Image: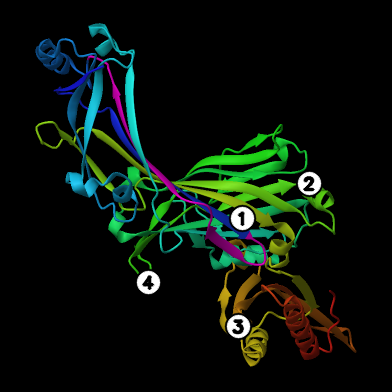
Amino acid sequence: MTEATLFARARPQVIRLIETYPYRITAGSHTEVEPTGTPSGRIEVVVPYDGRDCFSQQALSDVKQQVKQARGVTRLKARMGYLGLTSYGRTDLDERYHFSLAHNVIPLDIPIRGWGLWKEDDLRRDGHVFRCGWDYTPGFPQKTPLELTPLVYDETVLKEEDYLRDNRRIVKLTDGEVANRVSEFPRFERSLLLEFRLRLSLPVRLGSGGKASRPYIDQLALTWPVPSASRHFHLSLDGQEHPLVYNAEGQQIEWREVKLTPRPGRVAGSDFVRYEAPVMLLRIKQAGELYLYGGPAQPAELKGFIRVIIPRPLSGLQTRFYRATGEGDAAVNVERVSILDCQLSLHLEECFARRPFSPYRRVHFPNVLPETPRLEDIVSWLRRQRFSCDGPVDVSTNEQIQANRRRYLIQATRSEGAGEMILWIVVEGTVMDTLRERELPGRETYATFRPAGDLVIHIRGKVEGNRQRLTDVIEALVAELQARFPHVRTVQ
């Protein structure tokens, strides 16, 4: 059996460069992202015998002219060009294939006769496809590119952030919106909230590219160990509803195609560009069944995985196709992809234990005017407790002003352990004139107008960690307010 090599002006349909990096994410009292296993890489070249774009009529004519000189040869190949490789130092490609000895190029030869190809029609009827590839092992990035912050909490937590629907970014609520949320009496619902915040840091040397080359979450899946119904799950991304699939047979929740957006500038003090996914909020009804499944002796644990696609190789490997004449061919499609395959383990009880604590208190002072000294009393006490205060800010609406009602917002913050303690205080008051009439001897009546009012104070706090400390602060504030109005009955 003899072989020979010809030349043909063919070209690949696509050159794929795929790298896969396995990670393990464990979330509980803290979150760890660590590499596991061995990363893998593969270069693949695909050439269809289509008689049109890749193996064209021109390539077929080249073969016909040369095949006459190869009579008696049972196996023929045609060299269509070379695959050039650069920046492969973070892989074992040179150790495996010794590319540096061949000037960093790989000859690309495709079968013409043999290997299932025997007739001329086999080269042009789009019935055969040639594939070849090279496996290699890239090294893990020195810095773990993925950061995941999972939060588990219930609906009583006040979030001072909200999600804009137009540009999919997080912004602070206005003072008026915060005041509305603080003054709302918390309602308990049977829902558990899972919030995922994902960030990606990529070296600047890899380039940022345009919108088409932005990273994205291909799939995020959670195995739900309790039989449930799809109506019990709701997903939103930055406040926008997003499609969610619940596989009842496999008891798995999953969603796909979540784009990451670049953050302006580099990560401080490094050569990395950061990308962020929209805040993914999964609302789960009837979540108590999950705790019953795990039981106190075996707290519930959610398993899942996250697959992130990065449209460029993390190893920095570059490939380019050259024709047999040595000219570069930029028209050949080169797909470069890195895949982060992350196994996720979420310990719900530990995550829920470190959720933000947000208690609420309401105090009513009848016949007390909402005057400036009352606001100054509150601010003065907070500053004595080492709080930094923002306000009071008048957040009264036009309708409230016309109805002789005023509303003020005070926001106070101080460091507490490794985090911070936040207090939101909304002071609402009504001012009215009271007519008092007094009848003197001789049936003479004197009428006087005296101001009267009604004062309601809403207090909402938030802290992570020492919950008792926040409760003590709120109770001390209420006691201080009650002490300043000893002549007024306080209704709580």
Q: Is residue 48 magenta?
A: yes
The residues bearing labels 4 and 1 have C-alpha atoms spaced at a distance of 26 Å
* Main SS of residues in magenta: strand
- Residue at the disc numbered 4: 268
Viewer-side residue, 166 vs 114: 114
Secondary element type, mark 1: strand
The amino acid type found where label 2 is placed reads Gln
The residues bearing labels 1 and 2 have C-alpha atoms spaced at a distance of 17 Å
Which quadrant, please, contains the C terminus? bottom right
Q: Residues within 10 Å of mark 2 (few under 14, many from 20)?
A: few
Asked if the residue under mark 1 is in contact with the one under mark 4, i.e. CB atoms within 8 Å, the reply is: no
- Residue at the disc numbered 1: 195
The residues bearing labels 1 and 3 have C-alpha atoms spaced at a distance of 25 Å
- Residue at the disc numbered 3: 414
Q: Is residue 478 magenta?
A: no
Q: Give the range drawn in magenta.
A: 27-51
**Horizontal and vertical percent position of residue 113:** 25, 14
The quadrant holding residue 362 is: bottom right
| Mark whose residue sits in front, 1 or 3 | 1
**Horizontal and vertical percent position of residue 107:** 21, 34
- At 31% from the left and 60% from the top, the residue drawn is 204
**Horizontal and vertical percent position of residue 58:** 13, 16
Q: Earlier in the sequence, mark 1 or mark 2?
A: 1
Residue that lies at the very extreme toward the bottom in this rendered image? 384
Q: Earlier in the sequence, mark 3 or mark 2?
A: 2
Q: In this view, does 38 lie to the left or right of 364?
A: left
The amino acid type found where label 4 is placed reads Ala
The amino acid type found where label 1 is placed reads Glu
Asked if the residue under mark 4 is in contact with the one under mark 3, i.e. CB atoms within 8 Å, the reply is: no
- Residue at the disc numbered 2: 286
The residues bearing labels 3 and 4 have C-alpha atoms spaced at a distance of 25 Å
